[in-house]
Image: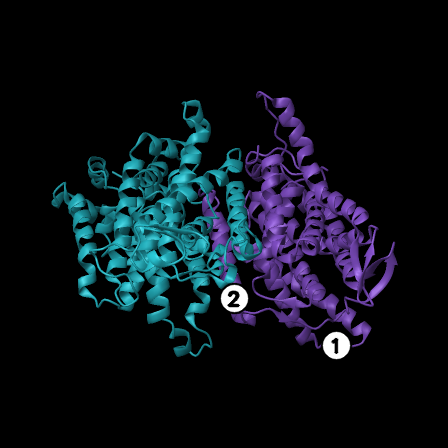
Chain colours: A purple, B cyan
Amino acid sequence: MEAGSLTPRTPVIAVRPLAAIRRYVGRWGLIVALAILPIYYGVRDLTHGYAAGVVAGHPVIHHDLTQLGFNFAVGISNGAIWALIAIGYTLVYGIIELINFAHGDVFMIGSFTAVGLWGTFGIGLSTGTAGVIGGLLGTLVVTMIVCGVLNVLIERVAYRPLRSAPKLAPLITAVGFSFILQNVGLLWRGGSPQSVNDLTRQGDTVFHIFGVPIVRGYLMALAVMIPLVFLLGRFISATRMGRAMRATAQDPEAARLMGINVNLTISLTFLLGGALAGAAGLVYALYNTNIWYFQGFKAGLIAFTAAVMGGIGNVRGAVLGGLIIGVIQALADSRMGPQWTEAVVFGYLIMIMVLRPRGLLGEETREAG
Amino acid sequence: MSSVGDDKQTPVGDGVPGAGDAPVPAAGQAASTGTEAGAARDGGFAELRAQLREWRAAIDRVLPPWWSRGLAIALIVIGIVLPFFFSVDSGFMNATIIAVAYAVMALGLNIVVGFAGLLDLGYVAFYALGAYSLGWFGSGFFYKAHIHVLVSPVAGTLPGIHLNFLLVLLAAALICAFAGMIIGLPTLRLRGDYIAIVTLAFGEIIGVVAVNGQSVHLSGGETLTAGNLGISAVDPPYFPGIGLFNELNLRPWYWLILGVMLLVLFVNLRLRDSRLGRAWIALREDEVAAVSMGIPVVRTKLMAYSIGAAFGGMSGAFFGTYFTVVNAEQFQFGFSIFILAMVIIGGLGSIWGAVAGGLLLGYINYYLIPDVLNSLPSKLGLNFQLTEIEFGIYGFLLVMMMILRPQGLIPERRRRLELTAKVSVSSTDAELAEPSSFRTTGVEE
């Protein structure tokens, strides 16, 4: 917990009438709310069954949990992408208490950069396996650098001059930059979604677990997310600069007095967050084989929900939240129809705010107390 | 600054002195008021700034004490007679009507964000609800009903619910006030950024419901909204005496929305100086202190949400009838930011600033970008139209405004005092990085 936590601990003072009920709801309300969707649909699949296909004109009704497992597989792999983005939100919020609205659009620029780099590196559908893997690794590194640097530049231009201003000010410049980046994307690749080469053949089934097909896309998303998160965790907990980040998150003033270069540390935080968003951008392009300039806005809001759900300022929380939101999204997509997904995710966001503003793994903060 | 003294005597004082220095070139304006960011940046302009301040003080001495009120009345009179200088269907009048309606929205959002300090990023929800109020109560959408109240003879024969536009406005205001309260409830325990996110989430949910409302069936077999198809053939307003409301005669539309704006403006001014307005400002400045002074935080915050929302709904209903269609595609997150940009560019918490920001961005959006400057990129050899990147332009404006002039074009009196006073008093929490430039701006007298 300490390793991944960037938010300072503050004592909890809550003496109100009905405090016990409130505490109870605060502790379990969100968890119950999260469990409702999968349990409801799981029970429904078992009792009512679901149409698993059509044979000779008659729908085949199954009574098992395979469809739920399928939802979970899709959700967790999608959630891996959200987790990578959510870490960027959570790191930045942990250190300067700013919702970096432009972060989702940095992710979008990451996708665009990655797809552009495929052309530069000359990898296409006819490239051999080794070429694709090498090219994608190169793309991953360059995309991460590009997005990290972009994020640092945004911080330098839009947030640093406003560090002593009221907190509303950097939030507004963040929104402003979000729009600027969106329009950069719009001019770059036009206003409609573009399909890109399915380089990894992400839809190919690799193996089955309990009848749930596991396709390459799922494995790829996790294969990028897990090592990156592990490295980040090591960096924050074990290196000198990581310690500087934690110190700055706790108290920038004291950190400065201790000889930490606060501005550099904040830039580093933005670099890390941007780099992870870049990685997410590449994975998104490979996984969804489809990019457009507006993807960043939606992804940003979903990932922010994930960060809040996990407990903002907490890296592990962000990963957990990302995976949970991914599953919620997959359930909503397949059960209620994709047009309602956004409303469901935002409904959960509001529920988090009402039931447990500090999130699943987070501590009480000044803002959300 | 003697202008501050003048302000205290006149209720409309916060904006009009600012309007008075409109002829000052933009660069001079940016430098004329000392801010933390500005001071750190252009310390070299200190002399110029002092000079400007001196001139402004001299101008204030020369003018009679009632000049700001006089200017306000003159502006209103000019506003009323404005349509006579343009043809009845000119593009400029169209832009003006929309800009005034935006100003109404900005005035509403200014109550929430500017007065009460609750950053609302879901204001589009009230645009949507206002517009749907019109769609529901002023068109043939609910074709099974036959309700007609004070409508034109034409609409009186059509199926559906047809209420007079004033009643629709009232309905929109009530619906939005209620929705604003609902949106406000979960944010009561939260502060700052979290409020922004919750309101944003609500705005998005309303947008999703608007788009998918076609599949939401009400009891009578009718749907909730018409989704992206839009509710079309909505009633134009009907007021015998000021002319026919149609696309070829824009004057009655203009007077209608101008009247709405003046009403909203008046309510705003009275609210600001009321007990409630002072409570909002106290909450904005320091919630803990305000609560311990006995301000009822729940009621005060909810009032801010619902009153702000009501104005947004009124403007939304007007937009619905003016655009003759209520289409779910209109209700995007970008719209919330667009209105927020108006409030911020005008000056957070400043009533005249909200009006100015609304008019300015309205004109930029509906006149300057599409009509005047749209072909600029192609003239420069670039292959796009300026309308495509309008939101990028607003984003850029927001960033620039926040960095160069965070108090807005026409700053609120209190905020201006705060900014100047803070610089001169607080040497303790001033940035240690640039002490010299702080001193230079800090010395006022």
Query: What amino acid type should be assigned to the residue bearing mark 1?
Result: Leu
Residue count near mark 1 (Cα–Cα under 10 Å), binned few <14, some 14–19, many ≥20? few
Q: Secondary structure at mark 1?
A: loop
Question: Up-down: is B367 above or below A50?
Answer: below
Looking at the rendered image, the quarter that the C terminus of chain A falls into is top right
Which residue is drawn at the image coordinates 44% and 23% (left, top)?
B292
Numbered tag placed on residue A184 in the rendering: 2
- A321 horizontally vs B121: left or right: right
Which residue is drawn at the image coordinates 72% and 43% (left, top)?
A237
Query: Can residue B113 be seen by looking at this rendering?
Result: no
Residue count near mark 2 (Cα–Cα under 10 Å), binned few <14, some 14–19, many ≥20? some
- Chain letter, disc 2 residue: A
- B72 horizontally vs A168: left or right: left
- Chain letter, disc 1 residue: A
Q: Where residue A170 sits: x, y (%)? A: 48, 48
Query: Can residue B33 be seen by looking at this rendering?
Result: yes
Question: Up-down: is B115 above or below B161?
Answer: above
Q: Earlier in the sequence, mark 1 or mark 2?
A: 1
In this rendering, do the residues under marks 1 and 2 share a single chain?
A: yes
Query: What amino acid type should be assigned to the residue bearing mark 2?
Result: Val
Distance between mark 1 and mark 2 Cα atoms: 27 Å
| Disc 1: which residue | A125
Q: Where residue B93 sits: x, y (%)? A: 27, 64
Q: Where residue B197 sits: x, y (%)? A: 54, 45
Looking at the rendered image, the quarter that the N terminus of chain A falls into is top right
Question: Up-down: is B213 above or below A32?
Answer: below
Which residue is drawn at the image coordinates 26% and 68% (left, top)?
B89
Q: Where residue A191 sits: x, y (%)? A: 54, 69
Q: Secondary structure at mark 2?
A: helix
